[in-house]
Image: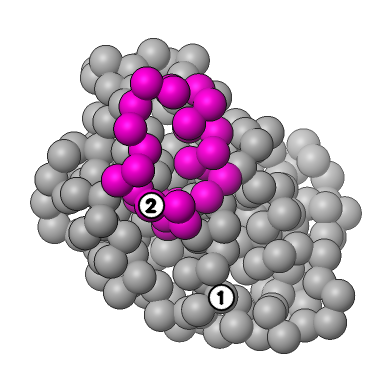
Amino acid sequence: MTIPQSGVGLATLLTLADSRLPIGGHVHSGGVEEAIAEGFVRDLPTLEAYLLRRMRISGAGSASIAAAVAAGVLPADAADRETDARTPSPAARAASRAQGRGLRRLAETVWPDHDWTAVGRRPHLPVVAGVVGRVTGAGPYETASVQIYTAMTGAAIAAQRLLALDPGAVAGCTVALAAECDRIAAAVARALPALSDESDPLLDHLGERHVRRERPLFVS
C-alpha cells in the first residue's frame, strides 16, 4: 500500500486491513469453501485465479461503495440501498451485514465520539467501512484499498486452511497480487461518484449453494 496522502495514519490503515480485526471476518471464506467443494479452487494457481476474480468484481463493487461514502458523495442510508441493489445473492447480503454489524460495534468502541446511528444497526460492511474512512480521514483510494485487500486476503487465508496449502506460498501469492489491488483501488477512486454495478453470477451461485451445505466450516 502506498503512503496515504489523506489525513489517516498508515498504522490505522494497516490495522483496518489486519485479518485479526475483530469483526467476524475469520468465519467467512469469501465463497472459497464452496469453490473448493465444487472443484473450482484446487491448488495455488486456481486460488490465484479465484482471488483475481473476487478482487476485480465483488471486491471492486464493495470498494466503490466504501470509497463513495468516505469521499462524502454518498450518504450512508443511500449507500446501504445501493449495496443491496448490487448484491443479488441473499447469502452474500447476509454475510455483508453480519460483518458490517461487527465493524460498527468495533467502531463505536474505538471512535465513541462519532454518532454511528446514521449507519443503522445492521449496515452492510462497505457502508460502515466508508464511514470509518471518513472518521479516520482516509481518502477514497485508501478506503478502497482496504476493502479490496481484505476481500483478497480473507479468501486466501480460508483456502490455506481448507486445502492445507503452504502458508509461505499463499503469502507469496497475495504479495504478487498487491499491485493489482492498488490498480483496482486507483480505478475505483478515479471513477467516483460513479459506482461499480457489476455482480458475479459464479460467486452468487457459490454463496447460495454454501448456505444449503450441511455443517460448513465457514459461515459464507
Mark 1 lies on residue: 91
Residue in the picture at 66% in, 47% down: 24
- Residue 202 on image: x %, y %: 52, 81
In the picture, which quadrant includes the C terminus?
Answer: bottom right
Helix, strand or loop at mark 2: loop
* Residue 180 appears left or right of 92: left
Magenta stretch, residue numbers: 101-127
- Residue 157 on image: x %, y %: 71, 48
Residue in the picture at 77% in, 83% down: 213
- Is residue 105 one of those drawn in magenta? yes
Mark 2 lies on residue: 120
Viewer-nearest residue: 90 or 4: 90
Q: Quadrant of the rendered structure where residue 8 is?
A: top left
Which mark is first along the chain, 2 or 1?
1
Helix, strand or loop at mark 1: helix
**As displayed, is residue 122 above or below residue 57?**
above
Crowd tier of the residue under label 1, counting other residues whose Cα lies within 10 Å: few below 14, some 14–19, many 20 or above:
many
In the drawing, what numbered circle is on residue 41?
Answer: none
Residue kind at label 1, given as amino acid type: Ala
